[in-house]
Image (spheres, rainbow, N blue to C red):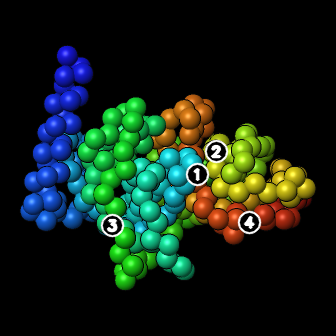
Amino acid sequence: MQVFLRYAILIGLWGLAAAARAEGGPKLQNISDVQKDVARPGEVKLVKVRGAVTYRKDAVGIAFVQDKTGGIAFYPRGVESGKQTGKPDVVEIIGVPMVNDGMLMLCGVASTEELPVHPVVSYLPDERLDIKLRKIELSMLTDLRTEAELVQTAGVMRRVIQKTKTGMTVEVTSPGSYVVVRLPWLPPEEEVGKWINRQISFKGVIACRAEKRLLPADADAVVFVSNPEDWVLQPGVIEKVLAS
């Protein structure tokens, strides 16, 4: 019965996709409205959003897009990048909102929880969108429950959790909070040694509702950092705090 229902849903979504193409696609929505609609019980439907790509990593299988109202994840594998220089890519995405890894994502119409498919992504090379960087305190994460937004924050790096060929995952803490940060590069050992028990200021996309694979159960959030320049050691900060 469950298999039959799944195929029925997929057939219905394919029909919606065909109808959307014939009518010029679904109406453009703010990302915050998509989040609200999904929170309400109702039928799954195609949506269209437009925003700036704030993070993309095919090896992780996740990307984020953000407009002036909020952010949402999408499945990027198989989608070519617009390869803009300077400011982030601006894209228009048509997809189906689904929950994967605990996060709301835009996926293709044939997606399942086990096999997400990339949505329809159109790059808009002549458009620019300035995303407001939100400054937050890690100690406030439990109350904020920020999701899929670009933030600036700071904390003390405690340890390296995992290393891979393409990057590393580290633990960053502040009084009352613990986050996992994913870095898409592998720095030299001597550089990493300078970070331990030191204050780091960093910019990245934060997700508080992710689940295991991306986020341990005891952490408050995972932060996806895009570039080495977004990760800055703040020497002397801890020493000043201890001295005072």
Circle 2 sits on which residue?
180
**Which x, y percent locates residue 73?**
42, 52
**Which x, y percent locates residue 103?**
42, 42
Disc 2 residue type (three-letter)? Val
Q: Quadrant of the N terminus?
A: top left
Q: What distance separates the C-alpha of mark 2 from that of mark 3?
A: 31 Å
Q: Residue at position x 70%, y 51% from top?
A: 167
- 51 relative to 150 in the view: left or right: left
Q: What distance separates the C-alpha of mark 2 from that of mark 1?
A: 6 Å
Circle 4 sits on which residue?
232
Mark closer to the chain start, 3 or 1: 3
Q: What distance separates the C-alpha of mark 4 from that of mark 2?
A: 16 Å
Mark closer to the chain start, 2 or 1: 2
Q: Quadrant of the C terminus?
A: bottom right
Instruction: Note whether residue 17 is visible.
Output: yes
Instruction: Note whether residue 144 is visible.
Output: no
- 224 relative to 23 in the view: left or right: right
Instruction: State which quadrant residue 124 falls in.
Output: bottom left
Q: Which of label 4 and label 3 is nearer to you?
A: 3
Mark closer to the chain start, 2 or 3: 3
Q: Which of label 2 and label 3 is nearer to you?
A: 3
Category of crowding for the residue at label 4, using alpha-carbon neighbours closer than 10 angstroms: few (below 14), some (14–19), many (at least 20): some
Labelled disc at residue 122: 3
Q: Residue at position x 14%, y 52% from top?
A: 18
Disc 1 residue type (three-letter)? Val
Q: What distance separates the C-alpha of mark 4 from that of mark 3?
A: 33 Å
**Which x, y percent locates residue 4?**
19, 22
Q: What distance separates the C-alpha of mark 3 from that of mark 1?
A: 26 Å
